[in-house]
Amino acid sequence: MEIFCHITQSYSLRQVNLHRILVMELTALTAISPIDGRYRSKTADLAPYLSEFGLIKYRVHVEIEYLIAMSRTGIDKLKPLQSEDVQSKLRSVVTSFSEADAQQVKDTEKVTNHDVKAVEYFVKDQLDHLGLGDIKEFVHFGLTSQDINNTAIPYSLKISSDEVLVPMLEQVVSLIAEHATTYKDVPMLAKTHGQPASPTRLGKEFQVFVSRLSEQISQLKSLRWPAKFGGATGNMNAHVVAYPELSWNDFANDFVETLGLRRSEPTTQIEHYDNLAAKFDAMRRINVILIDFCRDIWTYISMEYFKQKIAKNEVGSSAMPHKVNPIDFENAEGNLGFANACLNHLSEKLPVSRLQRDLTDSTVLRNVGVPMGHMAIAFQSILKGLGKLLLNQDAINRDLENNWAVVAEAIQTILRREGYPNPYETLKGLTRTNDEINKVRIHAFIEELDVDQDIKEEMKLITPFNYTGL
């Protein structure tokens, strides 16, 4: 009995504490997710599109655009909507949509226990205010919730991608390209398998990422954002039974196209998400390239090829005052990895649904803003990190000077050209030792070769600083 009472008391205390937590105001300090808390300033530009407010707003947008599109079918009762003035007033419901409007929808949802129905009632209420109450039953006419969700969500993703995420990504690529230009003539020791290899140019190594990212951004843009629009089970049954003379498939295709989306056809009750998954996969590939980039820059910093600008009051380590950590690239790598975990789940889960639909896609779709938020955080961290890089030419030169063995490839290639016997094996004997290989030793080796003096002089001109190819 004592144990039971103790458990009951503990549970009661937990309830009290839980109540205290529930009544806390949502702020950057109380938000559970860091994208709405710690990093809110970095994700704020996405909020108008990918938040609950954004979801409600774009649902309203689709309902109103659908109503206007319906008026062009020739349905007599909708002729009042053919007026440009009326259409402008209707569209102002979206352009002036406020948090108070979104809250009104949420309050209605508490009664209906259905989010899309609450949106329908909101739009009908707006029609009453505009003196269009006679046609309000054409709001959501013949539709199911997923006609709205599977159009509003990809639309919000399209707009947020076009206006926020992709421009931010292109800014990252542009800054990497600037570094590629700045460092285009900087020779650098390459590392393959972590070992010294034929020299390269630092700018060219940055340009590799510019090329990779540009290609994947192009592929991302080439993929159309998909939408589903076809009634309760995808066949536009209700539309056909009400107005069998109209070409509803053409109507649906044209309507979705006006939003800049591409209609998937045929479908079940929901979008099949294959093309949306392709979008997420394209984003994931971009993130993988950026993770690769962050790790390379992190490594260059650890090799002291780059130093970092120091902020006077910034602390690198709580214990070691001397440290200036590459935290921006580490932060970016972590956020990109988290984004990819979400994107991977979205692309694997969304295309799978039982029969004509189950509800698992609905709850997952509410999280599409999460990977976008983490991507935005990562992009801004990379921009910040790139802005702090300071080239350490001395460290780069020191590595080149300490690795004269890398010109062995050049020497043996010239010897091959000249028909010298076993040039690879000859250079292998020189370089695969634990003895120091420096300029003096290389030149002494060249002098001992049985080749013309002009060939020797040609080989002596080769250094780790100029053997950088194209």
Image (tube, helix red, strand yellow):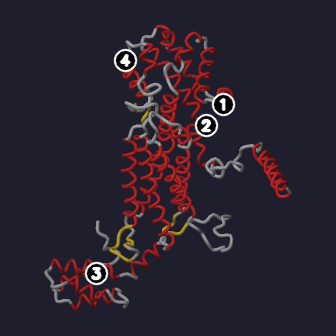
The CA distance from mark 4 to mark 1 is: 35 Å
The CA distance from mark 1 to mark 3 is: 72 Å
Q: Amino acid at mark 3?
A: Ala
The first of marks 4 and 1 along the sequence is 1
Q: Amino acid at mark 4?
A: Ser
Viewer-side label of 2, 4: 4
Q: Residue at x 61, y 35 (%)?
A: 53
Helix, strand or loop for disc 4: loop
On screen, residue 11 versus residue 48, left or right, reads right
**Where's residue 63, x and y in %?**
53, 24
Q: Is residue 86 above or below residue 99?
A: above
Residue, disc 1: 106
Q: Amino acid at mark 2?
A: Glu
| Circle 1 Cα neighbour tier, 10 Å, few/some/many (<14 / 14–19 / ≥20) | many
The CA distance from mark 4 to mark 3 is: 74 Å
Residue, disc 3: 408
Viewer-side label of 2, 3: 2
On screen, residue 111 versus residue 372, left or right, reads right
Residue, disc 2: 52
Quadrant in the picture for the C terminus: bottom left
| Circle 3 Cα neighbour tier, 10 Å, few/some/many (<14 / 14–19 / ≥20) | many
Quadrant in the picture for the N terminus: bottom right
| Circle 4 Cα neighbour tier, 10 Å, few/some/many (<14 / 14–19 / ≥20) | few
Q: Residue at x 47, y 53 (%)?
A: 172
Helix, strand or loop for disc 3: helix
**Callouts 1 and 2 close, C-beta under 8 Å:** yes
On screen, residue 326 versus residue 296, left or right, reads right
The first of marks 2 and 4 along the sequence is 2
Q: Amino acid at mark 1?
A: Lys
The CA distance from mark 2 to mark 4 is: 34 Å
The first of marks 1 and 3 along the sequence is 1
Residue, disc 4: 247
